[in-house]
Image (cartoon, grey):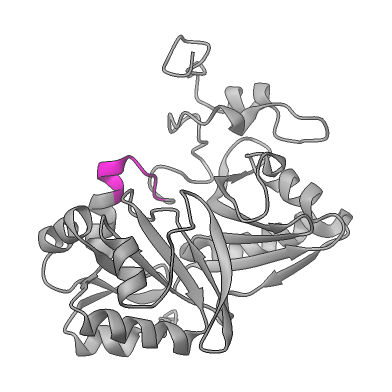
Amino acid sequence: MTEEIKVTCLHDRHVAQGALMSPFAGYDMPIQYVDITTEHNAVRHKVGVFDVSHMGEVEITGPDAAKFTNYIFTNDINAIKAGQILYGMMLYPDGGTVDDLLVYRVDDNDYFLVINAANIDKDVAWIMEQAKNFDVKVDHQSELYGQIAVQGPEAEKTMGAVLGIDTTDLTFYTFKKMEYDGKTIIVSRTGYTGEDGFEVYADPAIICKMWDMLMKAGVQACGLGCRDTLRFEAGLPLYGDELTAEISPIAATFHLWHVCEARQGRRFHRPRCLRSAEGRRHPQEAGGPGA
């Protein structure tokens, strides 16, 4: 039985623009519009825009939201304030990677998780299973959002001049909620490609409108081909390659010391993660870059 291929809210626009399309993570996605080199260089030197509406979104709210998010996430959300973002992983008890993700701290009892498209169903089921003993609500919101990533050294200028969104108040790994066309949107600055850049989460109709405005302004549409080359160039992982259920962050040699720190009440303790690293020594202990 052939699995049904999904499409994003921008799919018709990709096809109309003549993009090379291919299945990715269950979606029919653009690989390139012109060629990978042109799109790569647009992002590195000017600005480009990506359709990332295939990504998944989960909101965790409730009295135990902070405790629960810290329980499933390798980084420490107590280290950030509302409006800030952390990157990290969710791990299985043996140290294998459930997924790598971003956690947006909306407030003390509200966390917005952005997960990989290929893992949406698996991640949501896993999060739900872990939540059974916590007073939280896990709300799968992937169908509510479209998402674009405006990336490159001219991204800030483009966000203001073309989309009318002032992002000068956002620093690296921060976000804000704001009203746009009468609806609430989320704008963040995480640099999806390793370049400076912004991500916009909004109602699909708003995302389509923004895409049209960016195309009219001459912003280069970019596909997954240059996403891979850009992220590879910046040393950013892609789940399914560098990280999997069988590959822990340490085995993948990602120098994220916090991944396996033993914390009170946490299941993913440092010694067990180290044992899962296929005999590799922790870089800090080996006198590596984190020493």
The residue at the point 47 percent across, 30 percent down is: 251
Bounds of the magenta span?
Answer: 231-238
Using the image, determine if residue 95 lies above or below residue 71.
Answer: above
- The quarter holding residue 134 reads bottom right
Percent across and percent down for residue 264 are 82, 30
Percent across and percent down for residue 257 are 56, 27
Relative to the observer, which residue lies in front, 241 or 57? 57
Quadrant into which the N terminus falls: bottom left
Percent across and percent down for residue 213 are 30, 84
Using the image, determine if residue 275 lies above or below residue 13.
Answer: above
Left/right placement of residue 25 relative to residue 93 reads: left
Is 190 within the magenta?
no
Percent across and percent down for residue 18 are 16, 84
Using the image, determine if residue 61 lies above or below residue 253.
Answer: below
Left/right placement of residue 272 relative to residue 150 reads: right
- The quarter holding residue 159 reads bottom left
